[in-house]
Image: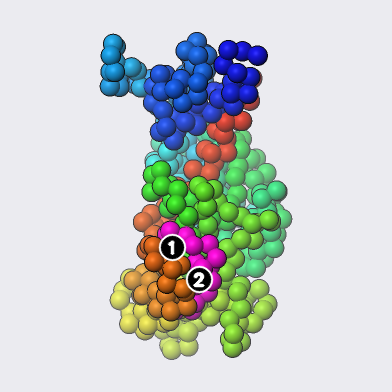
Amino acid sequence: MSADGGRRNSANGPGEILAMIRRGDVSTRAEVGEATGLSRMTVAQRVDSLLAAGLVREEGAGVSTGGRRPTLLRFDVDRAVVLAASVDTTHTRVAVLNLEGLVLHEVALTAYISDGPEAVLKSIAQAFLEVLAAVGRSPREVEGVGISLPAPIDPQTGRPSQPPIMPGWDDFPVGEHIRLVIDAPVLVENDANAMAAGEQTAESSDCRPLCLVKVSTGIGAGMVIGGHVYTGSDGGAGDIGHVRLHGEKAVCQCGSHGCLAAVASGRAVARQLAAKGIPAGHGRDVADLLAAGDAEAQALVREAGRRVGEVLATVVCVLNPAELVVAGDLASPSLLTGLREGLYPNSLPRATRNLDVRLTRLGERAALVGLTRLVVDQVLSAEAVDARLRG
């Protein structure tokens, strides 16, 4: 056994040191030694391996505690890029970001998921090449790719799992399809989960439990607990759009009657507006009417928020999150007001006394930022980095 201790030496390999630097736990070699208990020589070897691999860079000088000022260690967020695509029912956002989640260039595509996976993914792959070219990067500089879909994603296969509003997408090999164009690891995630990860990333080091509800053409929730996205046993966690409401008989796209999505989604509100003679076909149309100050749309969205809040009351009582973030096409003061009206009367005061209910801070970029975090966490996990450095 080495002087550093066999178990401790293994647990504090280069990958774990990189993780500590990324989190901001340490910023100098001396701090690495204090945090890990490793000898100066071992710290030097492991930090040097990270520097040689381009994962860490040295810059500036820290505060001296006696003697020379120490050189600071920083995660090199510009050494490579991440490609991300946030897919919705009628549109998609595609972006190239640095490893910290800063958007370098993005484009919006009109892409209908009803056209099927091959058509949508072909458009995304082409857009990936375009955004890379726009910032002077090549496919070889892509650390990983993230794609979010409005569907449950099987955590074992990374494929859509019986998505109720995506005919033709069930079990489709999304990652394999993208890798035909971009030869890099591909992570596929549910859209609400990706957005939740993005919103928490925007809170810096804050790892308080967070729940995000996305109200667009469909309705779904994403949860981050202990700093990790909670997916459930097979990717179905957060599928609140298909909770059935007592006394409701509206037919849902999943084939059931009375689902929350059939009553309070963007599609449902659009249907109600159309019945009143106001042209609307899906959630994006409702968003446009809200932006224009349409009183009828505001009233219907507020009522939709009440129904969503009633369902979220159970979620809040079970999970006791610190934050409840409202996102999606219908995210607006009207929706937020209605949601609060449905949530608070149906929850125990204790469950909501410290709950921050707010609109998204990142808007349509939430999923892009969240995907970047999830991709980097995966491809640069401690285990992955150690394996990479071993060759």
Q: What's the image's color scheme?
A: rainbow
Q: In the image, is residue 225 above or below residue 269?
A: above
| Residue 247, position as x, y percentages in the image | 59, 88
* Residue topped by disc 1: 324
Q: Which residues are magenta?
A: 306-326
Callout 1 secondary element: strand
Callout 2 secondary element: helix
* Residue topped by disc 2: 312
| Residue 35, position as x, y percentages in the image | 46, 26
Specify which label sits upstream in the sequence, 2 or 1.
2
Q: Residue flagged by tag 1: what amino acid is it?
A: Leu
Q: Which mark is residue 22?
A: none
State the residue in front, 172 or 24.
24
State the residue in front, 88 or 215.
215
**Would you say residue 93 is visible in this rendering?**
no
At 43% from the left and 62% from the top, the residue drawn is 324
Magenta stretch mostly in which secondary structure?
helix
| Spatial CA span between label 2 and label 1 | 9 Å
Q: Are marks 2 and 1 in contact (CB under 8 Å)?
A: yes
State the residue in front, 250 or 225.
225
